[in-house]
Image (cartoon, coloured by chain):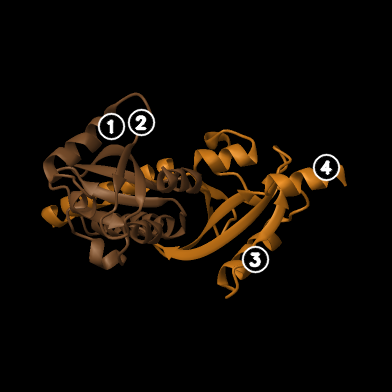
Chain colours: A brown, B orange
Amino acid sequence: AQIALERGYEERREYDARYRMLLATTRDAMVFVSASDGRIKDLNAPAASLLGAARDELTGVVFAQEFKDRRAGEFVDNLISLAMSETTSNLMVTARRSRKKLHIQPSIFRAAGERILICRLDAEADGQAVDDRLA
Amino acid sequence: AQIALERGYEERREYDARYRMLLATTRDAMVFVSASDGRIKDLNAPAASLLGAARDELTGVVFAQEFKDRRAGEFVDNLISLAMSETTSNLMVTARRSRKKLHIQPSIFRAAGERILICRLDAEADGQAVDDRLA
């Protein structure tokens, strides 16, 4: 059992390290959200920048609260439906802190018995944002 | 020990799942390379596409062999030096299969006693590629 335990620990450390390096290196803005409580489990620097706060300020907060006019339960349900739909549709939101208009593209997976949403955030294209301001 | 073992297993599964979902979701082309043997440990679909083969064809192959005029040992040493340098320089290579000109931006980390390079690949900007063809 000792050997198995140590091997498990080493493997866990390897996946943990790969996960952290990948999250730190990717330029896409990514947020991991628990589907059960709707809280941010983890996010990278580009995502924190789009939301308008530091990573450690955002970790653990209710994801829906970061957006205008979004209620927690309903918001997670919307993300889950989108993640499960066959079309690649996304959700359009306005970040409360940065006031940026963002598209959220969610996927869902199950890890250690928990359902987790991985959400890619994209700022609205500059051209569109300009059009909106002019309209 | 049984409880600790099971908890380790669940945690490993969670990091493994998060890692896999993140790798599948990011649009940046990413390749994980072992610093000890120079072989590709893992890569995502955008990276496979830039290199010009399927993911499973590329997993386990010597990374240097995927590029023109690159020798295995020297190539890994170059990537390690770049990863450790303070400037954000990158390596310019030509993919053997796709013939695409690529920039490699490496970072290095240690996981489970092994040094692993995480390499972000970027295709040369379209404008530059056109210039090259015209020259």
Badge 4 is on which residue?
B133
Q: Residue at x 44, y 50 (%)?
A: A28
**Which mark identifies residue B77?**
3
Q: Residue at x 57, y 61 (%)?
A: B106
Horizontal and vertical percent for residue B84?
56, 72
Point out the tag, 2 or 1, that comes first from the N-terminus: 1
Quick one: quadrant of the N terminus of chain A?
A: bottom left
Q: Nearer the viewer, mark 3 or mark 1?
A: 1
Q: Mark 3 lies on which chain?
A: B
**Which mark identifies residue A82?**
1
**Type of the residue with mark 2:** Ser
| Label 4, residues with CA under 10 Å away: few <14, some 14-19, many ≥20 | few
Circles 3 and 1 in contact, beta carbons < 8 Å: no
| Label 3, residues with CA under 10 Å away: few <14, some 14-19, many ≥20 | few
> In screen coordinates, is B91 left or right of B120?
right
Q: Mark 2 lies on which chain?
A: A
**Type of the residue with mark 3:** Asp
Circles 2 and 1 in contact, beta carbons < 8 Å: yes
Question: Is residue B94 visible in the rendered structure shown here?
Answer: yes
Horizontal and vertical percent for residue A7?
31, 56
Q: Which chain carries label 4?
A: B
Instruction: Determine the secondary structure under disc 3.
Output: helix
